[in-house]
Image (cartoon, rainbow, N blue to C red):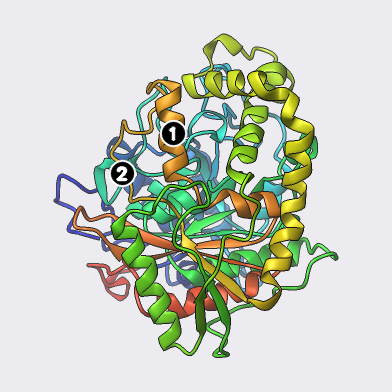
Amino acid sequence: MPASDSPQTANTFTNDALGNSDATALAERIRRREVSVTEVTQAAIDRLHKAEPLVHGVVAERYQQMLEAAAKLDRQPDLANAPFFSGVPTFIKDNTNVAGLPTRQGSAAVPAGYLVKHTSPFAEQMLAQGYLCMGKTTMPEFGFNASTEPVHDAPTRNPWNLAYSSGASSGGAAALVASGAVPIAHANDGGGSIRIPAAVCGLIGLKPSRGRVIENDASKSLPIDILSDGVVTRTVRDTANFIYEAERYYRNPKLPVIGKVEGPSGKPMRIGFVIDSINGHKTDDTTRQVVEATARRLEAQGHHVEPVDTPVNSSFPDDFAMYWGLLAFGMKLNGRKITHPGFDKRQVDGLTQGLDKMFKRGFWKMPAVLWRLRRARFEFAEAMSTYDAVLTPVLGHTTPKLGHLSSKVPFDILFERLTQYANFSPLANVTGTPAISVPMAMTSENLPVSVQLMSKFGDERTLLELAFALESKFSPWTFPVNTAEYSHA
């Protein structure tokens, strides 16, 4: 990342207890007592105070409580047998419950000040790995937008260039990790919300297979479960270690075991290659060049890469749009049950209102829409029968400036912009297959450009192996500090 004195960036990396360590290295340094958990937590707090006025990625914090928790960890006689990520600071997204913190879903329609009393099952699965939850991260209303620009609050800015979007709906998580404030943060994905912010902030974002981790609180009520939880990280090994530890906590017997992935497999794979979206919007030149260059890198590594048709019915974009509208309709109708008894549907933003109206105009289509969306899983599986993975863009064009995808933009214009932008990621949500975002280049505006890899249902291992190989060819994370120089008090 560029020098921290640049007015266009938010870079908090410095020679403190966090240094330039990823979560894996930091956890190892804590186990060896090279740094104390208290020092790490205080360093994170100091960085958050520096980053937050610039990126605005935090909606609720409990820094003092985590300092107290850190002190208790430091008094433990043996950290060698503690959970793998013990003492590593993190955040949970604002649509996932953590006892003692608010959950507002990024919306002014949900009352402020109410602290939830229970922690969601997935948050328990994640925090069981030993992280210290510093608070909750920003998101657009109900996760519907592809940019974190809630109408009732300041936008979340991209740390690489503060004039640009950090993506969504896990935009706050990505901004905090990319700025260096924490090395890893929770994200979840209902149409690209792990991969999109990871892509525009230069991070690794793995959307796991459906059922790989404990299901999201909202998943049980959906006619098609498109939701999946995970993390955004600066290194592939952090993502691999997160998913390995999550699997140790809970393993779905219906899915193949991933196991511990520590690098490329070295075996040649057959990889399909898609460059333009099925919805008719052509991918922009910069993104196209990066994806094509990635295909050549994969070929140079011994893989066979060939163009393929998008493995889905041509009605998919319109069908997903209707399902998107169904979610907005359901939120407005059942918001008091889903969020809080004080939910005020009059306060929802323009995007939620527009999606709701769009659904009401075409609700009669839903039986056929749901039938086709459910079929997509089988169509994708058939198309993938002779491939190990598919390479695509994550997004239809490079990161937009703030305002381009604001919910204040008239709905028809905003919806058209979203269909041009977030047009590659939803397929993995509907089919339940895993997909990963990997950064591969930087633009002249100092913004990351990433690619997406998708694989067969349950085959996260292949994605992680390919991501390790690509990471060795390009990573934006070159740091100005040397962790070894930090003096442990």
In the rendered structure, the answer to whether residue 366 lies left or right of residue 318 reads: right
Residue pictured at 71% horizontal, 74% vertical? 385
The answer to whether any part of residue 151 appears in the image is yes
Query: What separation in Å lies between label 1 and label 2 (alpha carbons)?
Result: 32 Å
The x, y position of residue 476, in whole percent, is: 31, 66
Q: Are marks 1 and 2 in contact (CB under 8 Å)?
A: no
The quadrant of the image that shows the N terminus is: bottom left
Residue, disc 1:
416
Circle 2: element type: helix
Q: Which mark is residue 30?
A: none
The x, y position of residue 142, in whole percent, is: 57, 30
Q: Nearer the viewer, residue 144 or 361?
A: 361
Q: Residues within 10 Å of mark 2 (few under 14, many from 20)?
A: many
Q: Nearer the viewer, residue 114 or 281?
A: 281
In the rendered structure, the answer to whether residue 285 lies left or right of residue 105 reads: left
In the rendered structure, the answer to whether residue 298 lies left or right of residue 326 reads: left
Residue, disc 2:
51
User: What amino acid is at disc 2?
Assistant: Ala
The x, y position of residue 38, in whole percent, is: 45, 55
The quadrant of the image that shows the C terminus is: bottom left
Q: Residues within 10 Å of mark 1 (few under 14, many from 20)?
A: few
The x, y position of residue 305, in whole percent, is: 50, 79
Residue 459, relative to residue 74: is it above or below?
below
Residue pictured at 79% horizontal, 66% vertical? 255
User: What amino acid is at disc 1?
Assistant: Glu
Residue pictured at 63% horizontal, 76% vertical? 387
Residue lying farthest to the right in this orientation: 253
The answer to whether any part of residue 472 appears in the image is no
Q: Earlier in the sequence, mark 1 or mark 2?
A: 2
